[in-house]
Image (cartoon, grey):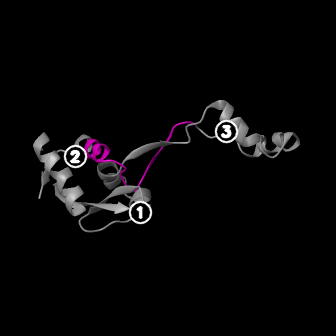
Amino acid sequence: MTQAEWQKAERELMKNGYVNFMIDGYKVTVVQAQITATRSVLIPFIDGEYSLKWLINDKEIVRRFFPAVKKGKKSANKQEEAVKKPGKKGFEIIKTIYPKPVNGTEANEGYYTSFKTMKATFTANNSSIRLI
């Protein structure tokens, strides 16, 4: 898609609340949904369906259409503070039961928070994108 087509898609999404794409043989409808009074997200429906099971089971759909995000990124001090909260006596017990979380664990979310992120994911992981 050209830059002008992406701009047209963004305008359609903001005006109508949805936009349709044909991406590598999949019909993808992106819907804008209000989750709080001041925050909205973009949710991709693939071939008319949306399922959070895809985030667990279908790695191909997830790679193509859902954003990868890094989770659990905390400094070493913040991780230790989170573990130390029960008090000094309980610290050693908790430290042995719950090891430090791995920084930068990658996961996928079922929605986009910006059009720019959605566009980047779609263009990086798919070869044919058309506005319909």
Q: Give the total number of marks visible in the rendering.
A: 3
Image quadrant of residue 17? bottom left
Pointer 3 or 2: first along the chain = 3
Q: Secondary structure at mark 1?
A: loop
Q: Secondary structure at mark 3?
A: loop
* Highlighted range, magenta: 103-122
**Residue furthest right in the image:** 89
**Marking on residue 52:** 1
Image quadrant of residue 4? top left
Please name the residue shown 73% across and 42% down the image. 83
Please name the residue shown 59% across and 36% down the image. 74
Please name the residue shown 44% across and 58% down the image. 56
Q: Secondary structure at mark 2?
A: loop
Q: Is residue 111 magenta?
A: yes
- Quadrant where the N terminus sits is top left
Q: Is residue 123 above or below residue 45?
A: above
Neighbour class for label 1 at 10 Å: few (<14), some, many (≥20)? few
Asked whether disc 1 touches disc 2, contact meaning CB atoms under 8 Å apart, the reply is no
Neighbour class for label 2 at 10 Å: few (<14), some, many (≥20)? few
* Residue underneath mark 2: 126
Whether residue 72 can be seen here: yes
Q: Is residue 114 above or below residue 21?
A: above
**Marking on residue 8:** none
Q: Position of residue 11 (x, y in %)?
A: 18, 52
- Quadrant where the C terminus sits is bottom left
